[in-house]
Image (spheres, helix red, strand yellow):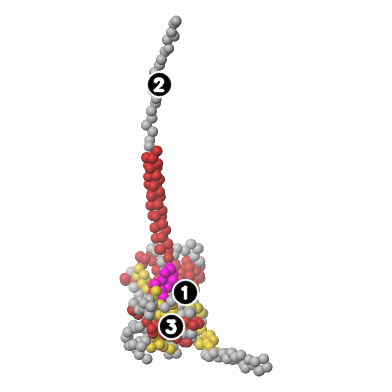
Amino acid sequence: MKHQRIETRSAARLETRNEPDPIEAATQAVAEMRTAFDARMTGLDELTARIDEIETRAARPGTQQRTEEPTMERRAFVGYVRSGREALSAEETRALRVGDDTAGGFLAPPEFSTEMIRELVEYSPIREAARVGSTARGSVIFPKRTAITTALWEGETEDSEESEPAFGQQEIFVHEMRTYTDVSNKLLEDSAVNIESELSMAFAEDFGQKEGISFVNGTGVKQPEGVMVNADIAYTANGHATVLAADPLITLLYALPKAYRSRGAWMMNGTTLATIRKLKDGQNNYLWQPSFQAGEPETILGRPVVEAVDMPDIESGAFPILYGDFAGGYRIYDRLGLSVLRDPFTQAKSGLVRFHARRRVGGAVTQAARFRKLKMATS
């Protein structure tokens, strides 16, 4: 019997591949994603910082970029400031309004005056609390209540008693203020410089500091009447001639009727404010509290604070603190129109042009009962 030969072949060699470790691959992918994410976050941080910088610069007074097309009056005013009246065309000259003073000059455009008045608050802080209006006249006359009206309960069969309101009149005069500032010819010739803002900020600082003094301590003669000068404002004694305590402030606050107290604000200088920041009430809580939100004021006993550098310091016999409803008890009136005169001669040797500015403003206490002062005295 023949045996069939069976041919045998060796099995094919298995092909092996060097495949990566899946855990290692996943780790590498995560690392790459993290690197890409960090790069994007770095770019985002840089962009955010840039946006914050732009917003900060844009929020500064006088640095806002205007996108609206300037009026002919405004273009003419800028041309007058930079180069003088002689450089203006006939049309631009007609667009400017001549001031009503004998010294000459032109009235600044309304936009310029509005921006300057807005910047005054930084140097004249009482403006942010008082009632501010405008007038085209030399004075403002308005009715002033001099007594409480006689409102009574009446029986059905009784004759009604006549209720007559007790009103008088008060007149607030607007007073003239003047200032000047010198600007270099190089600055005037630089078209990249917003010369309107430069002048506005300079005038606002000068006018603001001057009127701020008068709104606090002005005599009322050729200047506004200061809120601290009004003789009808009552006071609360501190109980000590030189040491300020917490209890008198609480007494002063609640000496005013609730209607006035709830709308009131404190006014004092920075030195007095620093002293109050150290005072505590009976529960060991500080009377002063910081602002917890942007745009919100710091408070004392829950009421906002107006810091006025012209308020007196703490000393015997002084009135370093005032509390009251400024919006209801003190009025400020701005006369429409700011006159600007360009003087290229006075400082010509120094390469400067002098700009004279003139405006009018008035202020006075209209309801003394809305205020109360703290006197550094025993009684």
Q: Residue at x 40, y 16 (%)?
A: 9
Q: Residues within 10 Å of mark 2 (few under 14, many from 20)?
A: few
| Residue 35 visible | yes
Q: Nearer the viewer, residue 239 or 365?
A: 239
Q: Position of residue 72 (x, y in %)?
A: 50, 67
Instruction: Please report whichever mark, 2 or 3, sits nearer to the chain's N-terminal start.
Output: 2
Q: Residue at x 38, y 42 (%)?
A: 27
Find the magenta span and give its range: 290-299
Q: Which residue is mark 3?
A: 253
Q: Secondary structure at mark 1?
A: strand
Q: Which quadrant does the C terminus fall into?
A: bottom left
User: In whole angstroms, how far apart are the C-alphas of marks 2 and 3?
Assistant: 103 Å
Q: Secondary structure at mark 3?
A: helix
User: In whole angstroms, how far apart are the C-alphas of marks 3 and 1?
Assistant: 44 Å
Q: Is residue 298 magenta?
A: yes
User: In whole angstroms, how far apart are the C-alphas of marks 2 and 1?
Assistant: 104 Å
Q: Residues within 10 Å of mark 3 (few under 14, many from 20)?
A: many
The three-letter amino acid code for the residue at tag 3 is Leu
Instruction: Please report whichever mark, 2 or 1, sits nearer to the chain's N-terminal start.
Output: 2
Q: Is residue 95 above or below residue 7?
A: below
Q: Is residue 359 magenta?
A: no
Q: Position of residue 347 (x, y in %)?
A: 34, 73
Q: Nearer the viewer, residue 334 or 243?
A: 243
Which numbered circle lies on residue 107? 1
The three-letter amino acid code for the residue at tag 1 is Leu
| Magenta-colored segment: predominant secondary structure | loop
